[in-house]
Image (cartoon, rainbow, N blue to C red):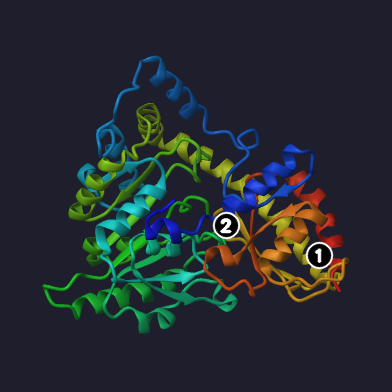
Amino acid sequence: MKVSKLAANLIGSEIIKIGNLVNDMKSQGAEIANLTIGDLDANLYPIPALLKSEIQKAYQHNLTNYPPANGLLSLRKAVSSDLKQRWSLEYSADEILIAGGSRPLIYAAFKAIVDEGDKVVYPTPSWNNNHYSYLTQAEKIEVETSQANNFLPTAEELKPHLKDAVLLAICSPLNPTGTMFTKEQLSEICSLVIEENKSRTADQKPLYILYDQIYALLTFGEAHYNPVSLFPELKPYTVYIDGTSKCFAATGLRVGWSFGPAEIMDKMKALLGHIGAWAPKPEQQAVSVFLNESTEVDLFVQDFKGKIADSLQVLYDGIQEMRSHGLSVNAIQPMGAMYLTIELDYLGRTKPDGSSVADSSDLVFYLIEHAGVALVPFSAFGNSRNMPWFRASAGGLSQEEIKNMLPRLEEALKQLK
């Protein structure tokens, strides 16, 4: 069967591939600690009680027809109010777009800004920018980051690549690392964008920032910063991605929002109108009610992120204990999101069957089989398969389950010579 060139060369998500394998094995009785998907066990982390009751109420009131293409006005107003209260950001309801989670919004932002052959700059590791660049036929410029900077891009690393670029895609707290920009780091990057846009003529497309802050409320003692709060003059050039999925443990509700220049939002709305990637109307209505109850929001987030932080700390401490036992492992202290960045420096080692660990993906599948532990290699986020760093997502396991899997992981690593 003949398919389009785009379809023929499209690469599926490595994270979903690993997650599907794990789920298949678990369905057959295997005991596996699944640290792959950036999702949550809803029994451990249920959505806010008020949000749940408002969803049920919306269905009882038969709010089951199409929502407006850009989202319910009540929700856009609630988002506008929350942005002003929480981040001192001034965005009207007309500058906010609601969709079925953050994914379609990121895709729509790429399609609204990027033409075939346009230059898109983003760091590695980062989530899905390589795939969105492919889908828009962009010239992707991947800027590899280092452990020394918590795998976050620096202004010095980005500067050589921004000339003629139309989009800089950055995220904080960062998926996959759980690390985040300091005020100084983000300010230096923003200054570069301002300088670059000043150098362009009126007939040139500007350099836009796509700023993914879906994890902004899940920070552990660190302050979250964003471009427009730091530099108001960036407002015409910044498209934000945000929503409910992570901060409200609501990954399956599919209510995300983007906000930015009205012209970009209008084009994104038109595109998503053709795709039909709307968030369900009952969930939109429920989120609008919940967002307006700021005390309820803050209480939920504080409790939720405290539990996530505790689980990540258990995992971090376990890795550091293995390190103290002489294993070639390391981890970066978690700062935000639900992820721990782990180094397992075992590529090239010999397995018990005599074969060698070929690359990071090979090590992942070895650990699934021999330790019952599933991680995601940084190769899923644009890095080389020869890079021994991995993402561990803590949202799907209890602290007890994390503690129980650590000895299995240690023993499996000890078997690699």
Q: Quadrant of residue 386?
A: bottom right
Residue 29, percent from left and from top:
79, 38
Query: Upstream in the sequence, badge 1 or badge 2?
Result: 2
Residue 96, percent from left and from top:
27, 46
Q: Quadrant of residue 170?
A: bottom left
User: Which numbered circle lies on residue 298?
Assistant: none
Label 1, label 2: how far apart the Cα atoms are: 29 Å
Residue 337, percent from left and from top:
54, 54
Q: Secondary structure at mark 1?
A: helix
Q: Closer to the camera: disc 1 or disc 2?
A: 2
Left or right of 90 in this view: 9 = right
Q: For the C terminus, which image quadrant?
A: bottom right
Q: Secondary structure at mark 2?
A: helix
User: Which numbered circle lies on residue 321?
Assistant: 1
Report the residue that reaches farthest toward the front.
1
For label 2, count other residues whose C-alpha is less than 10 Å away and answer few (under 14), some (14-19) or many (20+): some
> What is the three-letter code of the residue carrying label 2?
Glu
Left or right of 174 in this view: 404 = right
Q: Please name the residue that numbered disc 2 is placed on.
A: 14
